[in-house]
Image: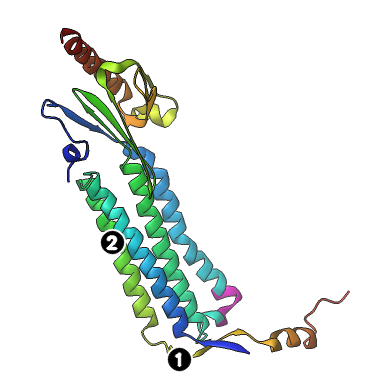
Amino acid sequence: MLSVPLYIFLFVYFFFLLIFAAFSLINILHITQTGSMTLVSFIITFITMALTVGVFYATWWLLKDVDWQTQAVLWNAEWIKNLFSNGQFPSF
Amino acid sequence: MNISNFIHRKIYEDKLYTIRRHPVTFLPTILLYIALGAVPFGVYFLIANIFPNLLIGPVSRPSLILFASAYYLSVLLFFYSYFLEFYLDITIITNDRMVDVEQSSLFGRTVAEVDLYQIQDAASVVNGVFPSLFNYGDVVVQTAGSVPKFTLHNVPRPHEVRQMLLDFSSADKQYHNKK
């Protein structure tokens, strides 16, 4: 049986957040470099950032009671074994 | 930084017009991303009806929440990146030259410019129901410069832009002939 603690998934998520932050910064840099910080670009940037904060808050709120030490089973040979023994394999 | 700094505005360039794509052409993208934002709700109802245990499992529930969170952040990032590709397609026209900035991707930008006296011909094209209703279209500029053809896509009031370019070009040609 191959299992990992659940917090590994959280680390993968944090790594994704790093990429997200880097790309967001590059986008904002593009706006400033091209002199395009206008009311329109400000409004779109503000809406995008507000929604991003909303996603972060919802994620934190939904995950606040999770036990991150729980083991997540990635692979278990029993799955295949049971597949045959339970008679779930299609018979012709 | 402002537009003047971006194009290194010369002291004798007293007029400066910035042309971007018509906002209506961004509406399909907004609708697409709203639809993408609704997808997890559909998936949620599917899972709730077919595999309800996944929504309460000690491992599956946090995993699904993290995945949904990453999905929404990706949608927001792609939306913002696409907005920049749309918004940073700028054409800057002064009384001396035309600068065309095309943001093709997050790491791809083309900047081309032509002196107005090198403009040989300009055509404006409004084709379709929405372009006719909202008065936007393409302006195709033929030049004698190193970039022979400029196409300004989906600009508002294309006929006026074409006329303005031709007027500016004519004035610039007169100025260069006097010299």
Callout 2 secondary element? helix
Q: Amino acid at mark 1?
A: Gln
Q: Quadrant of residue B151?
A: top left
**Mark before the other along the chain sequence, 1 or 2:** 2
State whether the magenta stretch is mostly helix, strand or loop. helix
- In the image, which residues are magenta? B48-53
Residue A69 badge: 1
Q: Amino acid at mark 2?
A: Met
User: In the figure, A26 relative to A66: above or below?
Assistant: above
Q: Residue at the right extreme? A: A92
Residue A49 badge: 2
Camera sees residue B163 = no
Q: Chain of mark 1?
A: A
Q: How is the image coloured?
A: rainbow
Which residue occupies the foreground of this view, A88 or B106?
B106
User: From mark 1 to mark 2, how far is it between C-alphas?
Assistant: 32 Å
Q: Residues within 10 Å of mark 1 (few under 14, many from 20)?
A: few
Asked if badges 1 and 2 are on one and the same chain, I answer yes
Residue A92 badge: none
Q: Chain of mark 2?
A: A
Question: Was residue B51 drawn as part of the magenta stretch in this picture?
Answer: yes
